[in-house]
Image (spheres, helix red, strand yellow):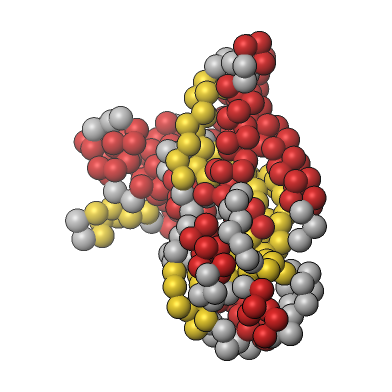
Amino acid sequence: MLDVRRLRILQYLSTYGTVAAAAQALHLTAPAISQQLAALEREVGLPVVEKHGRTLRLTPVGELLVSHAEIVLSDLAAAESDLEAIRGGGRGIVRIAAFPSAARMLIASVWRRVLGAGDEADVSLMLELVEQEPDVALETLRRRDVDLAVVHGYTVLPRDVPAGCEQIKLLEEPVLLALHPDHAARMGIVPGEPVDLSRLSGSPWLTPGPETSCYEMIQRACGAAGFVPAIRSRSTDFSVLAALVAAGAGVALMPRMALPDAMPEPISLHRLLRPVTRTVYTVSRSGTSQRPDIRHLGELLQQAAAETTAVLQETNV
């Protein structure tokens, strides 16, 4: 019978890439990792790792075992979650990775509920937050450095859920075109009118940095409209982009939730004739979503998402 602890070690080696990194993550020594891998190979009767230069990599047999280990370890995590639920759970720290606008709009709302005031405080949760773009957040989740990732995908740039993980949708929001009213008037764009992006092919563009998925979304949306955007300025801070739009520096595409709370003036906001939508969702490792504290956090995030959606709809943009 295969030893589950050795399967976990193999899974960590697959995740972290080196024996030293896997050993550090598991709080073991590198020789202990090597001994356990050798014992696993004796159990299997086939090599599960092979030397590749000065490092080890998985053999096809090792890859196969890791794919099964994901299922087995997810089932164990689910069993542990069920047992914890039966025992009544407890106050534990839930580590979250979230992109900036989700941290500002959703996580902050949840945190207010958790802290509360007096008897209103939700003492069942303690939160830790790290702000990360979705690709980094999913890698952080995969490496078990966080328990939950709040990420997004666009209709023009969908995002795959990693193997061994599960997702829950929180909300959908439109991507809006932001431009100065004078610019809109020169283009013959009526306030509140949906805009064909191709009309902005000759305009200067303001975008986030190329390390963000929003930048790639803009490239794809403009490409679908038949042009490559001429980028004049880049900033990862959407409040900076909004201020530049209000100054007449150019045009920008912004997810609705990314708009700053205090919008600078003047700015004209428009939906797109070919709508682009951003979907926000949580991702957790399979089996852990039923852990009482993570499940409770998911419920609070769903409430915050519903309230945020209602607020966004009130603006009628």
Residue nearest the observer in this picture, 104 or 54: 104
Rendered location of residue 34, percent (x, y): 26, 39
Above/below status of 253 relative to 120: below
Above/below status of 183 relative to 281: below
Residue under the point 29% across and 48% down: 18
Residue under the point 58% across and 59% down: 264
Whether residue 30 is visible here, answered yes or no, is yes
Q: Quadrant of residue 185?
A: bottom right
Residue under the point 32% across and 41% down: 22
**Residue 86 left/right relative to 23:** right
**Residue 257 left/right relative to 310:** left
Above/below status of 161 relative to 155: above
Whether residue 212 is visible here, answered yes or no, is no
Residue nearest the observer in this picture, 241 or 247: 247
Residue nearest the observer in this picture, 210 or 297: 210
**Residue 85 left/right relative to 16:** right
Rendered location of residue 103, percent (x, y): 55, 43
Rendered location of residue 120, percent (x, y): 67, 16
